[in-house]
Image (cartoon, coloured by chain):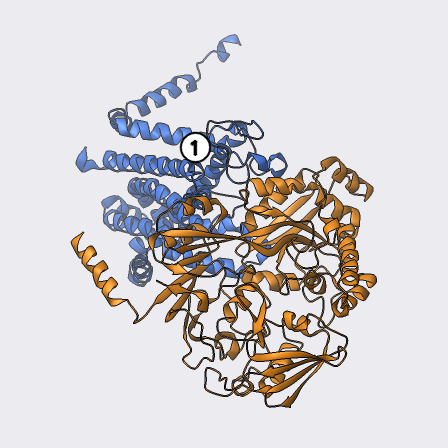
Amino acid sequence: MTQTETPPTPAPVKAPSRLSRAWHSDLAWSFRRAPVAMISAFVVIVLVLSAVLAPLIAPHDPFNPATLNLMNGFTPPGEANAFTGDFFFLGTDDQGRDVFSTILYGMRISLFVGFAAVMLAMVLGVILGLLAGYLGGWTETIIMRVADVQLTFPAILVAMLIFGIAKGITPPEYRDQMAIWVLILAIGLSDWVQFARVVRGATLVEKSREYVQAAKLIGRSPLSIMLRHILPNVLNPVLVIATISLALAIIAEATLSFLGVGAPPTKPSLGTLIRIGQEFMFSGEWWILFFPAVTLLALALSINLLGDWLRDALNPKLR
Amino acid sequence: MKPALLLAVACAIATPAVSETFHWAGTTDPNTMDPHAGNSAPVLGFLNNIYEGLVRRGTDMAIEPSLATSWEPIGNGEGWRFILREGVTFHDGSDFNAEDVVFSYQRAASEASDVRSWFASVTDVVAVDDYTVDILTSNPQPIFPDSIANWMMMDSGWTMASSADLPAPGEGNFATLNANGTGPYVLAERQPGLETVLEPFEGWWGEERGNVTRGIFTPIDNSATAVAALLAGDVDMINPVPVQDADRLDGVDGVRLIRGTEARVIMFGFSQDKDTLFGTDDANPFLDVRVRQAVAHAINVPAILQTIMRGSAEPAAQLVGAEMNGFSEGLAMRPGLDLDRARALLTDAGYPDGFSFLLKCPNDRYINDESVCQATVAMLAQIGLDAQLDAIPVSNYWPELREDNYDMYLLGWSPGTFDAEHPFRFLVHTPQDNIGTWNFGGYSNARVDELIPAIQSEIDPVARQAMLDEVAATVQDDVVYVPLYIQPLLWGAADNIELTQRVDNFFILRWVTVE
C-alpha cells in the first residue's frame, strides 16, 4: 500500500526543465546579450508595476476631493509648502494634488487604454488578415483596399474622427464614463491595418506550404486550418508589431488627451496631465508639466526599444 | 539671418500709413452678431464696434451722446425724450431715423430677445418726428439713459428684408452671422470660432477713431497658447492674460500688462424652484436656506484668491463691488470659512451625511473658472457634499442653465449700469416676462419684487440707498447667491499698441492706435 504511493510525480522535474529551457532559448540568450533591452525591460516593469499598484504606492488619492487642501497648490518639488508645511516629492498642481500620485494614477489609465487598444487592433487585424490571405478573391480585395484607404490617413486623424462620432452619439451624462472606452475603440480601430497586412502576407506564404495542402487533403475545414495550422506560424511578427503598437497607442492616447478629446480631467491620463501642466509652462511651475512628460517619454521609449530588440531577435536573417 | 532681416526691413517700409492690421485674441468667441440675442459681455462688447446705441460710454465710463445728440426727461417722470443725430447712415447706406429706434425697441423688447429686461419699465416708444423719439415709462426712471448704453440700433429695412425681424438666440437667423450697424467698423468677415474681421466704415458720423484699417479677432481658448501668440508677435493684444502669467508678461520687453479691476462679481447660484435634484427623485436640499448657508461657510475664498487667482482678485460679499454706485457699506463682510458651522447647518437641515448633486460650470468664460469649480468640489467634500462637476464651453452653458440642467452653478455678473440695482433686476427679481431673466435658480421674494421697481423710480439718493441696502441684506440672509470675488482685468498688448481698458471688459477698437 505504501509502495503504490511512492512513484514520483513528473511535475517537480518538469517545471525547472521548462524554466531552464526558456533560459537557454535563443530569445533569452539574445536578451542577455542586449543591455538596452534589459534596461528597457526593467523600466517597463517598474512603471507597469507602479501603475498597477498605484493605490498602494501613491501617498495621496488624487481622486478623493475630500483629501485635497487648496492651500497646498503649486508646492514646488522637494520643498515644504509655505502655508501648510506639507511636503510633496514631485510637488503639487494648481488644486493642491500631489503630482507623483496623479502620475501613478494617470499611467494606469494610459497603460490600460494602450493595452486594450492594441488587443482590439490585434484581434481585428489578425482575423481580417487571415481571412484575406487564406480566402483570397473578393474577400481579400475588399479587406485590403479598405486597409489601403485607411493607411492614407494619419492614424491620429482616424482616431479623432472615430472619437468625434462616438462622442456625438453618446448622451452627455455618460460622456465622461464612456471616454476611456471610446478612446480604446478609436485607437484600436485606427491601428488594425498593420496587423492585417503582415498577417495576410505571412498567410499567403504559409498557404502554399505542404502541411497546409496536407491538412486540406485530409478534409479539415478552412476555419480549422486557419486557426490550428496557419495562425501559430504567423504569430512571431504579430508579437513584434504588438509591442511597437503599444508604444504608439500610448502616445496616440496622450496626443488625443492633450488635444482635449481624450481622457477627462476627472480621470486624467498622462496626456491630460500634460495638457493641464502646459497652462503653467510660462509661469514657472515647470514640475506640473515636466514629470508627467518625462514619465510618458520613459514609458514610450522603453517599450519601443523593447519592440526593436524583439524584432531583431525574432528575425532569422539577423541571427 | 539675412533674409529674415531683409524681410523685417521690407515690412517696416511697407506698413506706414497704408494699412494697420491689428490682431487680437480672447477666450470667448461672441456667439452671435445679433445685438438683441445675447446679453453677455463678449457679445455686447464686440458689437459695440459695429452697432451703436442712442448713448454710449466714453473712456471715463460716463454716458455721452451717440446716435442721440441730447435727451431730457418728459414731464414729471413720464419718460425721456431723445433728439436723434441727423445724417447718420447704416453700413448698407440706408438712413437712420426715429422709425429705426421704434423698430429696435420692438425687437429688443420682444419675447425672443435676451435683453428685454432693459425695457421692463418702458410702456411705449413713440416717434414724434423723424429725429425725435419719446420713450415712455410706467414710473420715473432717473437713470434710464445710463441703462440703455448697450441697446443697439438696427435698421428696420435691412432686418425685415433678411427675415430677422425677431432675434433668434437658439436656432439663429441672418442677423446671427451678418451685421448692419451705424458704428465705426463694418463686419467684413465672420467665421464663428475661427476669425472675425472688422474694417472701418467710411461713412461713419464720428471723427475720433484710431488708425486700424483691419481688425482681426481670433478666439484662442487655451490661455497659454494666447500668451505664446502674444510673445511671438502673432497677435497684438490678448484678453485675458492668465493670472499665472501676469507677472512674467510684465517683465518681458516688447509687451506690457494692462491691469485693472473688472466690475464682474463671480458667484455660485442654486436651484431654488425645483422640487428634486437634477436627474433624480430626491428632494432638492438647496430649497433649505441652511444648506445654502453651509455651502457659503465651506468655500475657502481666501485660499482660492491666494492660489488659483494668485492674489490678483478681491473678495466679494455682494453682487456688486465696492466701486459701484449703490454698494451697501454695512454689508461688506463675507461669510467666513467655518467647517464646523457648515456641518452643523447640514445636520440641522437633515443631511448629516451630505448628498450628491450636479455642479455646472463654464470652462472658457471666466478667468480660471474650471479650476475654481474643481477647488470648490474639494472644499464641499470636506463637509460631506459630493459635487459632480460638469465643466462645459460657454456656448452650451447658458442653454443648459435655461433648461435647468444643474443643481448649483457658477455665474459672473458685471452691472451694465454700474449700479447695485442692475444685478437685483436680472438675478434676484422673480423671473417674469422681461425681468429676472438671468435668475436661473428661480429665487422669489415678494418684498424684493416690490422694492426693485421702487428703487428704479426713486430720485432721493438716501431713500434709494436704504432700499438697496434692504435688498442686499435679504440677498445675503437668504444666500440667494454665494458671491466669491471680483474678477481682475488683465490684458496684454504689444508695446506699439495704444488702447483704453474699460472696466466692463469691453474692447473698443476705435480707441486702438498702432504706432
Q: Is residue B340 above or below residue B188?
A: above
Q: Residue at x 71, y 48 (%)?
A: B332
Say which of B122 and B220 sits in front.
B122
Which subunit holds the residue at mark 1? A
Q: Residue furthest top?
A: A2
Say which of B95 and B24 sits in front.
B95
Q: Residue at x 79, y 54 (%)?
A: B474
Q: Residue furthest bottom?
A: B129
Where is mark 1, residue-wise?
A48
Quadrant in which the C terminus of chain A is drawn: top left
Q: Is residue B119 above or below residue A192?
A: below
For chain B, give the colour: orange
Q: Is residue B390 visible?
A: yes
Q: Residues within 10 Å of mark 1 (few under 14, many from 20)?
A: some
Q: Residue at x 69, y 60 (%)?
A: B420
Image coordinates of residue B53 in percent, x first then y, are 57, 76
Secondary structure, mark 1, is helix
Image coordinates of residue A69 in percent, x first then y, are 60, 35
Instruction: Indicate the chain coloured blue by its letter.
Output: A
Image coordinates of residue B368 in percent, x first then y, are 54, 49
Image coordinates of residue A169 in percent, x first then y, are 53, 61
Type of amino acid at the residue the image marks with label 1: Val
